């Protein structure tokens, strides 16, 4: 029986969808795990579902020979060693679109609150101060929203921003078709200079680490605000802290941080704590009931399709093969090193066993090849041993 382990309070929609697809052995663990606790929990799992606080390193994955696939019930996949997963023949799936609306709404809300100086007014009113001054408080209408990274979330932010009267510009190193009246800018520096609100929607990784430096923050208007709902290491936090304390920036909102607590019991540490003109939220951009429901169903569906049929469409690290229902006696999922002769030898093994190949799909990605082969009869244990013993084989499974 296929075993699936879900960690970190993944939404009930995931369990419901997996059960509807015939999976009964589903273990739910309501927190992140690490070390031997993690490896013990996954020792006999065929699939694991995680969010952002469970980290699957190469060392961990190398000790999980039974694991066939990983589902990240979130947008990011930087908590998984993708190189190691690929080398081991483990496809990784995520939910790149399901929380787009939730993140976009939070960004627009934060832009409005910051430009109206609501965080400061809120703190002061709680302290009993009656500050009705309009100084430094602005409408968002006609203000310039600068979007850094014009992908799914960035484009959605732009559409919502235009609906409340903002003028939208964006910078993306790749050519992106503008939606609505958004206009592309040639450089990031040009965006930093022009925008009243700068919002970040770039992926993590070395290419974007400290993308927003002290020098780029210095380009911003003193009345402007910065919003980061992307990745914590995109912004130089110390530089941002200095700019805010020196009144060179009107405010900021952060939902992600360079270092984040692994659980509710761990204290959140940041130099930005206590600043009245800063909104700090605990990585909740996608934490709405709607988003979590959508994410649960989306990633669970990808896991189910892979486990039942070998589908790898939209895997972030793997050759992509579209979904085709299994309508034959046997289906072989074969992951191998991408080198000449592998498929020819495998097909010769099928022929030697008297099996007719009904359909076959092959895709490669870098050093990895992935083939799905449908045959019209049962696969013997001897043939499986032969296929698994092929020198180029990384993984071989019978569906």
Image (tube, rainbow, N blue to C red):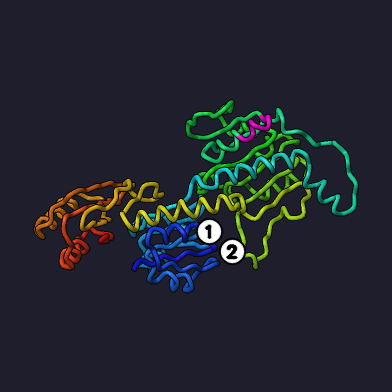
Q: Nearer the viewer, mark 1 or mark 2?
A: 1
Q: x, y (%) of residue 179?
A: 54, 29
Q: x, y (%) of residue 101?
A: 57, 43
Evaluate whether residue 163 shows in this view. Answer: yes
In the visual, does 341 lie left or right of 266? left
- Picture quadrant where residue 191 is located: top right
Q: Residues within 10 Å of mark 1 (few under 14, many from 20)?
A: some
> Magenta span has 62?
no
Bounds of the magenta segment: 160-166
For mark 1, give the secondary structure.
loop
Between discs 1 and 2, the one toward the N terminus: 1
Tag 1 residue: 11
Residue at the location (90% across, 46% down)?
130
In the visual, does 82 lie left or right of 126? left
- Check residue 336 in the rendering and tell me which mark sits there, or answer none: none
> Magenta span has 162?
yes
Q: Does residue 164 sit above or below 284 in this rendering? A: above
Residue at the location (55% across, 36% down)?
155
Residue at the location (87% across, 54% down)?
127
Most extreme residue toward the front is: 20
For mark 2, give the secondary structure.
loop
Tag 2 residue: 262
Nearest the viewer among 43 and 235 is: 43
In the rendered view of the protein, which quadrant contains the C terminus?
A: bottom left
In the rendered view of the protein, which quadrant contains the N terminus?
A: bottom left
Q: x, y (%) of residue 272?
A: 72, 52
Q: x, y (%) of residue 274?
A: 77, 54
How many numbered discs, if any?
A: 2
């Amino acid at each position: 029986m296929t075993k699936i382990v879900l960690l970190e309070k993944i939404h009930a929609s995931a369990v419901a969808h997996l059960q509807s697809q015939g999976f009964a052995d589903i273990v739910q663990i309501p927190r992140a795990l690490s070390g031997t606790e993690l490896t013990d929990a996954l020792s006999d799992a065929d699939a694991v579902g995680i969010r952002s606080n469970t980290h699957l390193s190469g060392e961990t994955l190398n000790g999980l020979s039974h694991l066939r696939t990983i589902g990240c019930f979130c947008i990011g996949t930087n908590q998984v060693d993708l190189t190691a997963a690929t080398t081991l023949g483990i496809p990784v799936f995520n939910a790149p679109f399901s929380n787009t609306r939730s993140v976009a709404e939070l960004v627009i809300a934060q832009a409005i609150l910051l430009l109206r100086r609501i965080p400061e007014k809120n703190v002061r009113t709680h302290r009993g101060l009656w500050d009705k001054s309009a100084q430094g408080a602005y409408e968002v209408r006609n203000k310039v929203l600068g979007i850094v990274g014009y992908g799914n979330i960035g484009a959605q932010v732009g559409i919502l921003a235009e609906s409340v009267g903002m003028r939208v510009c964006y910078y993306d190193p790749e050519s992106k078709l503008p939606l609505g009246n958004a206009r592309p800018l040639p450089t990031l520096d040009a965006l930093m200079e022009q925008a009243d609100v700068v919002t970040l929607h770039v992926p993590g990784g070395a290419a974007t680490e400290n993308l927003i430096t002290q020098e780029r923050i210095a380009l911003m208007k003193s009345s402007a605000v910065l919003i980061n709902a992307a990745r914590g290491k995109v912004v130089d936090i110390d530089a941002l802290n200095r700019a805010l304390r020196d009144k060179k920036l009107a405010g900021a909102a952060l939902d992600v941080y360079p270092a984040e607590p692994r659980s509710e019991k761990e204290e959140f540490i940041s130099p930005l704590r206590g600043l009245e003109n800063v909104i700090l939220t605990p990585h909740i951009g996608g934490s709405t009931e709607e988003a979590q429901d959508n994410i649960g169903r989306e990633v669970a569906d990808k896991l189910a399709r892979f486990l039942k049929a070998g589908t790898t469409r939209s895997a972030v690290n793997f050759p992509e093969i579209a979904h085709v229902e299994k309508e034959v006696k046997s289906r072989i999922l074969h992951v191998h090193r991408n080198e000449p002769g592998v498929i020819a030898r495998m097909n010769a093994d099928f022929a030697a066993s008297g099996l007719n190949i009904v359909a076959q799909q092959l895709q490669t990605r870098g050093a990895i090849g992935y083939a799905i082969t449908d045959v019209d009869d049962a696969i013997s244990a001897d043939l499986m041993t032969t296929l698994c013993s092929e020198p180029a084989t990384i993984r071989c499974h019978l569906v």
